[in-house]
Image (spheres, rainbow, N blue to C red):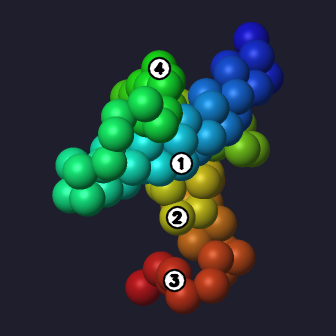
Amino acid sequence: MIQRLIRKDRHLRKQYNSFEIWNKLNKSLKKSLFLYKISKNIALKEKKKYSKVTIRNYCFKTGRSSGVIPFFRISRMLVRKKAGIGLLLGIYKK
């Protein structure tokens, strides 16, 4: 179940990135059509907009979706455990 969610998340991230590039290109083309008064028959067809809301951060070690530190991409419990023994660079326990 967790592996399926991680695969789904990876797929959504990939789709979002490709559609984000497409939408930025389309947006810049629309602006240039407006600014330079070019005929509109060269306008690109719009693609479906994907939302970032569906993209979740999962811990790559445990698969946990809540309490994930984005910088390390591991859950808060693992960060606490690894920081306690000094495995994370720049983070230490006093």
Specify the amino acid type for callout 3. Answer: Tyr
User: Which residue is pictured at 23% across the width and 51% down the height?
Assistant: 37
Q: Which residue is mark 2?
A: 71
Residue 92, how many percent across, how many down?
A: 51, 83
Question: Sequence order check: which comes first, mark 4 or mark 1?
Answer: 1
Of labels 4 and 3, earlier in sequence is 4
Position of residue 54 relative to residue 60, above or below, is above
Which badge, 4 or 2, comes first in the chain's sequence?
4
Mark 1 or 2: the one toward you: 1
Seen at 62% across and 84% down, the residue is 89
Q: Considering only order in the chain, which callout, 3 or 2, is on the residue closer to the N terminus?
A: 2
Q: Secondary structure at mark 4?
A: loop
> Which amino acid type corresponds to the residue marked 2 in the rendered image?
Phe
Residue 21's disc number: 1
Label 3 sits on a secondary structure element that is loop
Residue identified by numbered label 3: 92
